[in-house]
Image (spheres, rainbow, N blue to C red):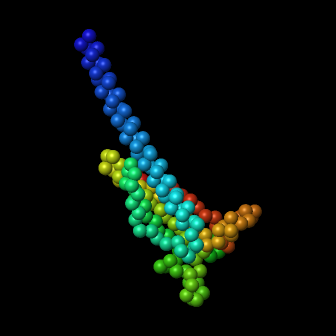
Amino acid sequence: MLIASLVFSIGIVAVISLQKTFFTIAGSANARAIATRLAQNKIDQLRVLDFANIDEGVSQHIMGAHSFSRDWNFTSGYYNNGIYTTCGNDLCDLDADGVSDADQKAIEVTVSWTNADSTVESVTLDHVINANPDAASGVLAGGYTAGDSGERPVLSITTSE
């Protein structure tokens, strides 16, 4: 009876330890899902702005079950004969008229947080916003037209672990 009690006790301790691991993993997955939604929400907010008013963001702290920090920045650019070119100081003044000729902004939104075990994690979403969204969603036959650039917008997701 004593040996059976010992085996049962060891089994209970193992199950409790395993349950703690499950809760930790579930909490981390929930935080990652929230962070991804926060990053996507920021991209959606930037997409509805006038192209000229899209700017880089100072860190925003969002409180909840976890404390999230959201930052975003952009790089202006244009396509020239199918080659994407970024602009120095975000000004693409191709014709020297003092006005930017950039027709796209590559946005990067990063949301970071600290897990219960004090590890810092982050989610980064990249998205391209076109100056003329109608052109970006224009004719599909024969290729994409993204602001006469010949390239389609790309969304990529990068996570840290």
In this picture, is 46 found above or below 91?
above
Residue 106 visible in the snapshot = yes
Q: Position of residue 95 (x, y in %)?
A: 60, 87
Position of 24 with respect to 79 (left or right) is left
Quadrant in which the N terminus appears: top left
Q: Residue furthest front?
A: 64
* Residue occupying the point 40% across, 65% down: 59
Q: Position of residue 160 (x, y in %)?
A: 42, 53
Q: Residue furthest left?
A: 2
Q: Residue furthest bottom?
A: 97
Nearest the eye: 83 or 67: 67
Q: Residue furthest top?
A: 1
Residue 158 visible in the snapshot = no
Nearest the eye: 116 or 90: 116
In this picture, is 4 found above or below 149?
above
In this picture, is 159 found above or below 145?
above
* Residue occupying the point 38% across, 38% down: 23
* Residue occupying the point 61% across, 72% down: 131
Q: Position of residue 89 (x, y in %)?
A: 47, 79
Q: Position of residue 154 (x, y in %)?
A: 58, 61
Position of 61 with respect to 44 (left or right) is left
Figure disc tally: 0
* Residue occupying the point 30% across, 19% down: 8
